[in-house]
Image: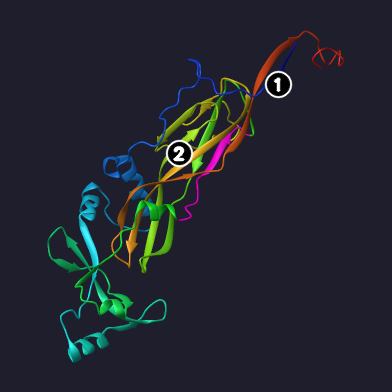
Amino acid sequence: MKLEVRIEEGPPVVADSSEEAVVAVGAGPVAYDPDEDPAFQKALRQYLSDQGIDRPFNPDTIAQSKSQTFGLQNPCTNRRGAVLDDCLAERVCTTDGGGEGVYMNVVVRQGEGPSTPWGEPMCVAAAEAEGDEEIVELPTFTLQDFRTLAVAPAASAVQPAPDTLKGMHTNVYAEAQGQQFATELGGFPVQVRAVPVQYAWDYGDGGALGPTELSGAPLEEGAWDVETDTSHVYTETGDYAVTLTTWFYGEYSVAGGPWLPVAGLNDVASAPVPISVWRSTVRNYADDCLQNPQGAGC
């Protein structure tokens, strides 16, 4: 007796809203505060460690950063005439654009407290240094600024693909990397880090998962129909597109100053992964194909 398994394609279907349909887990991005997410902080600490950056990162230091004001202080303020000229001459430099510049001190102020030096002096255009302002406030890198960067989306994978079976566990996972950018804001050089912290999948049939910190993982070689934290079971045949959205946490450094958190997450969509869901049909046949090669099912 021979056991035959035949794969037959079913017609495309529309997402089902009945009780048997897969229920979406989370309809969209959740309100997210990294201060309250130990899993995120662990992931970020690991990322920074992997990059060779050894610095504490916890809710206390984030809260402290949010209450700090960073700026540039003119060391020659309140000086006039020849004294001002001598002071500026001692701090002359050339800006990145090749113009005449002056080294100014980077300072930090905690709340209403006094300003204290931070890091190395920064070369700025001489016209800015000659102003009357004692402190020139450094710009804030916003979520809108973050979203202008070309943050690479996560690689989205589906197993098996491009075909899977109705009723079996189809595994999905994301592979995302931390990224670093050099940009400019308000004439100041800015370094930006983007760290993946949340993922969400739309399976294409009305089912969804996330946002979650779980990125999933590939199955072992030869494995299939294995339930995972991110797998999905299709209940109807048809052609679907699996879409992945990854949320990146950002932090930035202006003019070599401290790394500060970007307020909010940058959501980046990956290219959809097409997948066809088939049904399997099992039939039993009595013929022995060795004795009767022309028999049914042979």
Q: Check the image and tell me how it is coloured.
A: rainbow
| Location of mark 1 (residue) | 8
Residue 216: give x, y in percent of width and height.
47, 36
Kind of residue sitting beneath label 2: Ser
- Quadrant of the image containing the N terminus: top right
Up the image or down, 166 lies above or below 249; here it is above
Tell me the distance, in whole angstroms, between the alpha carbons under discs 1 and 2: 32 Å
Furthest toward the top, the residue is 286
Up the image or down, 4 lies above or below 71; here it is above
Q: Is residue 133 left or right of residue 219?
A: left
Circle 1 Cα neighbour tier, 10 Å, few/some/many (<14 / 14–19 / ≥20): few
Furthest toward the front, the residue is 132
Residue 98: give x, y in percent of width and height.
41, 81
Secondary structure state at the residue bearing disc 1: strand
Can residue 83 be spotted in the picture?
A: yes
For the point 26% across and 78% down, which residue is it? 129
